[in-house]
Amino acid sequence: MQVHILVDLNMTEFNYSSGQPAPESITDKIYGNTLSVAGIPDIDLSQLGVTKHGNYCVEVIDPISDYWELI
């Protein structure tokens, strides 16, 4: 399952690959797991681009510019 975690204006939203929002029971479990994550470096979310660490990959995008290109 591919998942997307969107971070925008200090709000995080978790969507399934179909675009549907995940129920609160799922997001609560995800949050609980984040409390025990160790060894992952801090990622500067103010810088656009891809950051890789082991099996993890975080891509920071500018959703406004993507939207602007569509219109």
Image (spheres, rainbow, N blue to C red):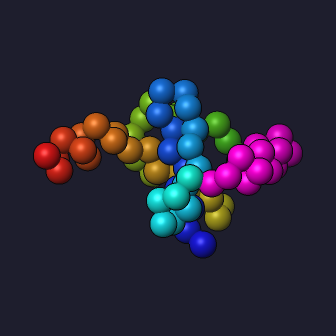
| Image coordinates for residue 13, horizontal then vertical, percent | 56, 43
Q: Nearer the viewer, residue 7 or 60?
A: 7
Q: Which residue corresponds to the image point at 51% horizontal and 65% vertical from the top-left?
A: 17
Name the spot of residue 69 as percent of width and height, x first.
16, 47
- Asked if 7 appears above or below 49 in the picture, the reply is above
Side of 12 where 61 appears, left or right:
left
Q: What stretch is highlighted in magenta?
A: 22-38
In this view, the residue farthest toward the right is 36
**Magenta segment main secondary structure:** helix
Q: Quadrant of residue 12?
A: top right
Front-lying residue, 39 or 34 = 34
The answer to whether any part of residue 13 appears in the image is yes
Who's the residue at 60% across and 72% down the image?
A: 1
Image location (x, y in percent) of residue 41:
67, 42
Residue 45: say if magenta.
Answer: no
| Any part of residue 30 in sight | no
Q: Quadrant of residue 65?
A: top left
Q: Does the magenta stretch include residue 29?
A: yes
Instruction: Residue at 33%, 41% (x, y): give it.
Output: 63
Q: On screen, 32 above or below 19?
A: above
Q: In this view, does 2 lie above or below 59?
A: below
Residue at 34 percent of width and 40 percent of height: 62
Nearest to the observer: residue 51 or residue 34: 34
**Residue 1 vs residue 67: left or right?**
right
Count of labels shown? 0
Residue lying farthest top? 9
In this rendering, would 38 be left or right of 41? Answer: right
